[in-house]
Each structure stands twice: as C-alpha cells, then as structure tokens.
C-alpha cells in the first residue's frame, strides 16, 4: 500500500466502519493500544494504531509506515458549534447527543488527511 490519498481515506474509513459496530458504553476511559484492546467506542478516543487496523480488528502489519490517530468527542444536538464535552470518557450517553469520530491518517510521519463522521448513539 503506497502513499496515496485514496489509501489514506480507506484507512480512515476502516475506523469508521469499526466504530459503527461498537458499544457506546464499553471501554469508556481505557484507550485502545492495538486491535486486540478495542473494547467499545470510548476505547477509540485517543487511540493510535501504527501499523493501522481494519474494521475486522486485524492489524495491517505489512503496512508499518501508516498510522491512524483517532478521537471521539461528544456534541449536544442543540448546539453543534462546539463539543459538549471534549473527553468521551466523561460523558454519559443521552438522546440529545451525537458522537463525532475523527481519524487522522499519516504515512511516514506526513499527514495525509483527517476525516470525521457523526455517530448517533
């Protein structure tokens, strides 16, 4: 997998597809350090995967130059201009909130882009 914007976007999308399958409560406060330690959406907040991982929780060890840096923040539906709580672990899930998943992908230390998605708990 050589450096390319398409590959970077695909690696970001892997994290998004993984996030869609995760429990919003499990893993809050414990940051994942690898594919085997992802325990819930909260475990993605602050996680760095180098080499990157897939949505199936497989490590792409053949691509050690790529890195996925993940953050999850909580936003209030009534005011999407700023996060309600920057730290996922401190927030309780309510119907008035959205989660914002951000994934920054780097290759050889050079940022290839940041992608983000809204997640409805």
Image: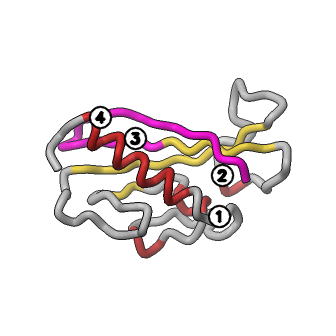
Q: Residue at x 55, y 57 (%)?
A: 19
Foreground mark, 2 or 3, reads 3
109 is within the stretch colored magenta: yes
Crowding at dot 2, Cα within 10 Å, few <14 / some 14-19 / many 20+, comes out as: many
Crowding at dot 3, Cα within 10 Å, few <14 / some 14-19 / many 20+, comes out as: many
Instruction: Give the residues drawn in magenta, as a range.
Output: 103-121
Q: Position of residue 15 (x, y in %)?
A: 45, 53
Q: SS at mark 4?
A: strand
Q: SS at mark 3?
A: strand
Tell which circle, 4 or 2, labels the residue nearer the N-terminal end.
Answer: 2
Real-space Cα separation, disc 3 to disc 1, in angstroms? 21 Å
Instruction: Return the residue at label 1.
Output: 28
**Residue furthest bottom as drawn:** 36
Q: Position of residue 94 (x, y in %)?
A: 84, 52
* Left or right: residue 71 compared with residue 14: right
Instruction: Return the residue at label 3.
Output: 104
* Left or right: residue 105 compared with residue 61: right
Crowding at dot 4, Cα within 10 Å, few <14 / some 14-19 / many 20+, comes out as: some
Tags 3 and 1 in contact by the CB under 8 Å rule? Answer: no
Instruction: Return the residue at label 2.
Output: 88
Residue 118 disc label? none
Q: SS at mark 1?
A: loop
Instruction: Return the residue at label 4.
Output: 112
Q: Residue at x 80, y 35 (%)?
A: 77
Tags 4 and 2 in contact by the CB under 8 Å rule? Answer: no
Residue 6 appears in which quarter of the rendering? Answer: top left
* Left or right: residue 66 compared with residue 32: left
Tags 2 and 1 in contact by the CB under 8 Å rule? Answer: yes
């Amino acid at each position: 997998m050589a450096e390319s914007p398409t590959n970077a976007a695909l690696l970001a999308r892997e994290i998004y597809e993984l996030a869609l399958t995760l429990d919003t409560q499990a893993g809050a406060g414990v940051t994942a350090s690898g594919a085997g330690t992802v325990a819930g959406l909260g475990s993605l907040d602050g996680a760095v995967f180098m080499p990157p991982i897939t949505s199936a929780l497989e490590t792409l060890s053949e691509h050690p130059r790529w890195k996925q840096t993940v953050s999850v923040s909580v936003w209030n539906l009534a005011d999407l201009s700023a996060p309600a709580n920057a730290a996922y672990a401190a927030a309780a899930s309510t119907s008035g909130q959205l989660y914002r998943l951000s994934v920054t992908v780097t290759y050889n230390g050079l940022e290839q882009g940041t992608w983000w998605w809204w997640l409805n708990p």
